[in-house]
Image (cartoon, rainbow, N blue to C red):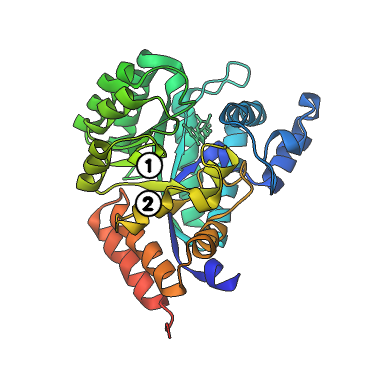
Amino acid sequence: DVFYRELPKVELHAHLNGSVSFQTIEKLICSKPQLNIKHNMTAIAKGQRRTLDECFQVFKVIHQLVDSEEDILMVATDVIKEFAADGVKYLELRSTPREEATTGLSKRKYIETVIQAIQQCKKEGVDIDVRFLVAIDRRNGSQVAMETVQLAEEFLLSSDGLVIGIDLSGDPTVGHGRDLIPALQRAKNSGLKLSLHLSEVLSQHDETDLLLDIPPDRIGHGTFLHPEMGGSQNFVDKVVQKKYHLLCLTSNVKGQTVQCYDEHHFKYWYKMGHPVVICTDDKGVFATDLSQEYKIAATTFGLDREAIWKLSKQAIDYIFAPDSVKQQLKQRWRELQPEFK
Ligand code: 5GP
């Protein structure tokens, strides 16, 4: 739909390897035929659903396909251009640095390569401002988390504002957030912005409490925060006070933490007037894009075009880049705003 495609958008929750498109996966499959990977192992098609556990298996398959500097450069460049083609004007990409002995990839090189992709796109004049969050995979424990933060700190100082924060993600059923608090606290103290996945599954209440109290600068999913989903008013109050929340519709439905679009917690937060930002999470794995997610929100929750416009514009207030970037983006939105009847 043209309106949604042309709608200028802000994407604040996109995992690099979950965002790899069908076309890019095709190139990777062709370059590594010996792995014998099929498309249905890397993406969840329309109408299909998987358990959260199965979703995390999908990421492992993609990681097999993306294991060298060359792959990361291609994947990151393609993903950035695809978001730009979908009308995204500001993108915060997040990715977990990996080392691969077979290809000589180091975590430092991994981050440098993503930065290189961002700079290359900028040089080519791709119309999108991209920033990078270094991700901690909770599966890897406290020591790796601390090392990741230290690495991110170096890039915070040397990347000209491109590396701006830390993401905590990975299988929410593995490990406990308590072990990661020292690393996250350190990140916060050194000026890295904190975006945390939390309350993605029920039964994480003590963890949710700890993570919310850091406090993070933004949270992702928060599916089970509110009382109707088994959360608590206390959680809701903390989130409202801090004004942060990113929501991914299709990701939650396909990963089965939410039963259907209609029951998505978007409704709860939106109705109470709490600012929410619609995001894709993993546009490749969940076979979607940000235009489509806005359209789904509009049709599911009965939002007219003006309300959708407001939603996309309001997202600017929650970006991690400095105020000057917010002002530039607001100016773009003013220039592009259509007439609403
Ligand atoms: P990468 O960090 O390799 O660029 O992107 C894939 C990784 O992002 C996954 O291995 C996982 O750690 C994280 N990820 C992607 N989607 C989700 C999600 O919905 N929830 C959580 N907790 N982590 C995710």
- Percent of width and height locating residue 132: 40, 42
Give the secondary structure at mark 2.
helix
Q: Are marks 1 and 2 in contact (CB under 8 Å)?
A: yes
* Residue 91 in sight here: no
- The tag earlier along the polypeptide, 1 or 2, is 1
* Residue 179 placement (x, y as % from top left): 32, 16
Q: Residues within 10 Å of mark 2 (few under 14, many from 20)?
A: few
Q: Residues within 10 Å of mark 1 (few under 14, many from 20)?
A: few
The amino acid type, in three-letter code, at marker 2 is Tyr
Image vertical order of residue 152 relative to residue 175, above or below: below
Circle on res. 228: 1
Viewer-proximal residue, 224 or 70? 224
* Quadrant of the drawing holding the N terminus: bottom right
Q: Residue at x 50, y 59 (%)?
A: 297
In the image, residue 267 sits, relative to residue 175, either above or below, namely below
Helix or strand or loop: what does disc 1 sit on? helix
- The front one of 217 and 84 is 217
Task: Provide the residue designation for mark 2.
Answer: 268
